[in-house]
Amino acid sequence: MVNAAHAKNVTGRKKNDTDAIWLQKLHSCGLLQKSFQPEEEIRVLRTYVRQRKNLITICSDSVRRMQKALEYIAEVGYDMSKWKTPKRFAAWNNVVPNNKITGEKVIRSALMKKKNKAGQCLRMATSTLWHDRSPLGDYYRIHRAKCGGKGAVVVTAHKMSRMIFIMLRDKVEYNPDMLTQAQQDHTQRRIKQMERQLRRLKTIA
């Protein structure tokens, strides 16, 4: 077992099909240093320690997620009839932009300056989705590419707020298809909008 970095720094032709022969030749000439490998008992211990660390990390992440969920429920409760619609619920959570409009143009868009613990929980949870491989993580990354990190946090927190409203109102579990269906509906609306624009352009031309 040799250190790959040492083999990389030695000049010469390196091909996958002759890699073993090339390494043997370098080693016989004393151009490579052996890579450190502990005894078998230590390697077994190392495997257990690494696995233990991974499990602790997973457990810690799960505990943090449950803690955030409990904090959120403690702020909003279970009765969604107080807000009537997901839109009003998202506005109460302060995860919608406060647009300043003049002459039908948005001249400024920012969150309202008010303290809302529930909204803060949503935004904090959203900010951890960068490496998440779920549909919600995909949703966050798509909007991060469109409107930057802060914008993506607000947009995704808004989506989470609406999903939580539906879950608590209808007493259903989280279903990733909720987000997938919403993305498909948005794509279809966008396609129809572009088709209308294309037809208008053709009539002008």
Image: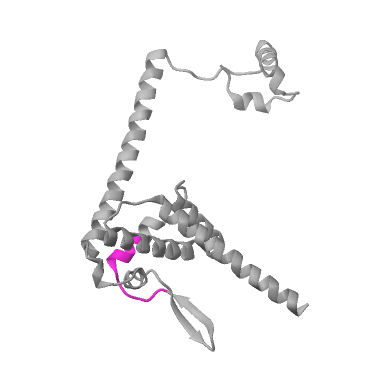
Q: In the rendered picture of this protein, how many numbered marks are placed on residues?
A: 0
Asked where in the image residue 179 lies, by quadrant, the reply is: bottom left
Report x, y in % for residue 141.
51, 55
Q: Is residue 20 left or right of residue 127?
A: right
Q: Is residue 158 left or right of residue 193?
A: left
One can see residue 121 in this view:
no
* Residue in view at x 29 percent, y 54 percent: 172
* Residue in view at x 43 percent, y 74 percent: 97
- Residue 102 is a magenta residue: no
Report x, y in % for residue 139.
48, 56
Asked where in the image residue 30 lies, by quadrant, the reply is: top right
Quadrant position of the N terminus in the picture: top right
Quadrant position of the C terminus in the picture: bottom right
Q: Is residue 94 above or below residue 186?
A: below
Residue stretch in magenta: 111-122
Report x, y in % for residue 101.
49, 84
Report x, y in % for residue 149.
49, 61
5, 181: nearer the viewer = 181
Name, please, the residue furthest toward the bottom. 103
Q: Is residue 12 above or below residue 109?
A: above
Visual colour scheme: one colour
* Residue in view at x 31 percent, y 51 percent: 173
Name, please, the residue furthest toward the right. 205
31, 94: nearer the viewer = 94
Q: Is residue 204 above or below residue 158?
A: below
Q: Is residue 92 above or below residue 64?
A: below
74, 201: nearer the viewer = 201
